[in-house]
């Protein structure tokens, strides 16, 4: 009996020890070659290549890192982050391609981080990084802010956080961000920046999504460190740009600083300027160089050229793009140059050193001492407005630029300190998956023969429309913006009383709902408003203008079209002989309203599309005679929302009989 008890005691002790000593193996992989490496969906070169959220093939290159989960059929199964999404895939088990390192994540390391205040969701991934880089330090910063409150503050106004992506699921469908029918408002002249959705904001604000070697540097403390040799890392950041050390540095007005200038002045490279800017202002020069590279690109921009804008404001520089925000190039560039003029930045040196000072005094000195905090103003007392830029992915990309330059210069393992924020009531995790999408808006809502008032917009939830007394049913058509959302309440609806309320419910993939209510009234013909009459006779209302095939006709035909359906209506045309762009149509029936008629292609209002319209568009594009109002709208012959060379070609093809203009 004693022997059995002893054996049981040993077994129990074994399991207790196993529970206490739960140290975890971790295998790190790093791409060794600059050559791009394919990632496969299965452990076979004949399987599909992995693609990112925008449909592009994923290629890993030096010095990307990832976790190796196991080995299958001569392939590493890896878990990695790419364009901020996480993926699982396979790459060849080849020591010439992948550097493999094995680590043990000790419970004691996790416990030390927990003792600092990090919970389980923070402690383990940080313990992995601490194990790989023992000299790294992680400091907790408690914002003392409620997570949901922070997200609401960051979501409005919608242009506070922008994203450049063809993945529409990342875009906001809030009011002022989404126009409906699959059209999002853009916040730049290039039509590529959109307001980020709340799900997207949550993901990029959640620090835990970026606890890997490639992106942890968005939390790096950015103060100057005397113990680091910054020169190699700066050179690495600037390599391949207009600021590379082998590029000439123009003479700097007001300073005895030139590069390769034969007059005997001191020679200075961009590398030295960034080093000096960092030293003078107490900020990492590698961070300064990385930020400028991201802001100016490899070839520079108007704000770093000194050439001014449209023959004005020459000789001023804004390398960090301070103040350069707004809608359209004119606004953005002029604001950036005005900022430089106010600061007196009349040379690259002045802009870089002065910009570093502004960055330090405006951000770092105030506690916004990381890329993350400079993007998200949550330092006490949080104002949520003092944010360096609108690009929500900026810390992600800038952090990787920092990591890459450190890695290439073999200083990743140096004594870096990271400031990690936490919030109250954080969710267990956040993600960018389709299943977590919270978009519950409608892309379109339509009831044929029943004109919605107000006109449909995804953010408006309550509508009215009217049908004739004899109508017994209508068909409600509703399409969700997000293909993974569900719509209920649409379809054939019986109208049993004079007032009928139809509720269309959209359920997002994440489970949240939004309800659109339409009150359908059955009324006499004399009670229809002009807008309702227009919609019932098949004429389009577009921003107050009337268009469509039904107006490209004679005045008598248009009048007859309306009177045949609404005999009580009075119809008046400003030109009783011919219809063209700018012709005014007035309808009186339960009120009176005047509309401008719009004939696409006819931008001079003479009722035909001919060589005169072609010349009018040409003059507009050459800025010799600008169009406006309905005539500008009519020049958008291909209906893409802008007037450009494509419209000129569309009108030309129409005149030659080789193309058509859709009304």
Image (cartoon, rainbow, N blue to C red):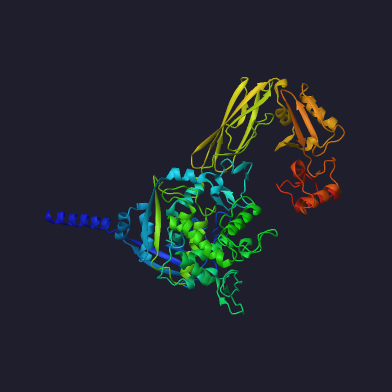
Q: Quadrant of residue 9?
A: bottom left
Whether residue 45 appears in this view of the structure is: no
Q: Position of residue 318 (x, y in %)?
A: 58, 61
Foreground of the two, 97 or 521: 521
Q: Residue furthest left?
A: 2
Q: Position of residue 383 (x, y in %)?
A: 46, 47
Q: Position of residue 86 (x, y in %)?
A: 48, 56
For image coordinates 51% across by 36% down, the residue present is 513
The quarter of the image holding the C terminus is top right
Q: Quadrant of residue 526?
A: top right
Foreground of the two, 192 or 505: 192
Residue 204 vertical placement versus 34 (above, below): above
Q: Going by the image, does 608 lie left or right of 82?
A: right
Q: Residue furthest front?
A: 254
For image coordinates 59% across by 72% down, the residue present is 249
Residue 178 vertical placement versus 193 (above, below): above
Q: Going by the image, does 577 lie left or right of 262?
A: right
For image coordinates 84% across by 44% down, the residue present is 609
Whether residue 251 appears in this view of the structure is: yes
Q: Going by the image, does 184 lie left or right of 438?
A: right
Q: Position of residue 258 (x, y in %)?
A: 58, 74
For image coordinates 74% across by 23% down, the residue present is 589
Residue 94 vertical placement versus 502 (above, below): below
Q: Quadrant of residue 558?
A: top right
């Amino acid at each position: 009996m004693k022997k059995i008890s002893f054996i049981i005691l040993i077994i129990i002790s074994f399991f207790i020890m196993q529970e206490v000593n739960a140290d975890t193996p971790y295998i790190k992989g790093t791409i060794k070659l600059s050559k791009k490496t394919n990632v496969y969906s299965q452990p076979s070169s004949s399987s599909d290549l992995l693609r990112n959220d925008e449909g592009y093939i994923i290629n890993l290159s030096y010095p990307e890192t990832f976790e190796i989960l196991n080995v299958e059929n001569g392939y590493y199964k890896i878990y990695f982050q790419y364009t901020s999404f996480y993926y699982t895939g396979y790459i060849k088990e080849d020591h010439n391609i992948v550097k493999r390192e094995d680590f043990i994540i000790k419970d004691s390391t996790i416990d030390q981080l927990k003792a600092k205040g990090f919970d389980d969701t923070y402690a383990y991934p940080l313990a992995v990084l601490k194990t790989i880089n023992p000299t790294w330090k992680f400091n907790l910063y408690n914002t003392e802010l409620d997570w949901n409150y922070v997200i609401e503050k960051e979501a409005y106004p919608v242009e506070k956080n922008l994203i450049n992506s063809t993945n529409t699921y990342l875009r906001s469908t809030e009011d002022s961000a989404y126009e409906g029918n699959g059209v999002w408002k853009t916040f730049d002249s290039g039509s590529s920046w959109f307001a980020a959705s709340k799900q997207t904001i949550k993901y990029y604000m959640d620090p835990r999504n970026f606890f890997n070697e490639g992106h942890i540097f968005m939390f790096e403390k950015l103060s100057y460190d005397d113990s680091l040799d910054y020169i190699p890392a700066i050179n690495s950041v600037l390599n391949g740009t207009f600021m590379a050390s082998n590029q000439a540095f123009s003479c700097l007005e007001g300073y005895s600083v030139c590069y390769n200038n034969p007059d005997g002045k001191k020679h200075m490279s961009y590398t030295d300027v960034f080093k000096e800017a960092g030293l003078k202002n107490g900020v990492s020069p590698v961070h300064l160089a990385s930020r400028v590279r991201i802001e100016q690109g490899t070839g520079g921009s108007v704000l770093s050229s000194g050439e001014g804008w449209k023959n004005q404001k020459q000789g001023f520089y804004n390398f960090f793009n301070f103040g350069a925000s707004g809608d359209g190039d004119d606004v953005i560039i002029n604001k950036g140059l005005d900022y430089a003029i106010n600061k007196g930045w009349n040379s690259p040196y002045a802009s870089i050193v002065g910009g570093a000072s502004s960055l330090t005094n405006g951000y770092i000195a105030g506690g916004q001492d990381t890329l993350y905090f400079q993007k998200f103003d949550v330092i006490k007392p949080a104002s949520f407005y003092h944010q360096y830029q609108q690009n929500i992915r900026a810390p992600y990309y800038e952090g990787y630029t920092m990591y890459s330059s450190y890695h290439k210069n073999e200083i990743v393992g140096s004594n870096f300190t990271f400031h990690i924020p936490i919030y109250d009531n954080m969710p267990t995790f956040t993600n960018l998956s389709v299943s977590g999408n919270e978009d519950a808006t409608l892309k379109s809502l339509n009831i044929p023969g029943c004109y919605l008032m107000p006109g449909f917009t995804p953010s408006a939830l309550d509508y009215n429309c009217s049908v004739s007394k004899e109508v017994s049913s209508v068909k409600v058509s509703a399409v969700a913006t997000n293909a993974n959302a569900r719509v209920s309440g649409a379809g054939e609806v019986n109208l049993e009383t004079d007032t009928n309320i139809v509720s269309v419910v959209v359920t997002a993939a994440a489970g949240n709902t939004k309800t659109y209510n339409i009150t359908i009234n059955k009324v006499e013909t004399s009670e229809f408003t002009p807008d309702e009459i227009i919609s019932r006779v098949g004429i389009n209302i577009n921003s107050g203008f009337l268009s469509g095939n039904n107006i490209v006709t004679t005045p008598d035909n248009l009048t007859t079209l309306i009177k045949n359906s609404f005999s009580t209506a009075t119809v008046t045309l400003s030109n009783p002989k011919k219809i063209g762009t700018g012709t005014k149509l007035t309808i009186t029936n339960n009120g009176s309203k005047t509309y401008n008629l719009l004939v696409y292609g006819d931008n001079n209002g003479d009722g035909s599309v001919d060589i005169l319209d072609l010349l009018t568009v040409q003059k507009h594009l050459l800025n010799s005679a600008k169009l406006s109002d309905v005539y500008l709208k009519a020049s958008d012959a291909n209906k893409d929302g802008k007037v450009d060379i494509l419209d000129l070609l569309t009108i030309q093809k129409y005149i030659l009989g080789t193309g058509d203009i859709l009304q």
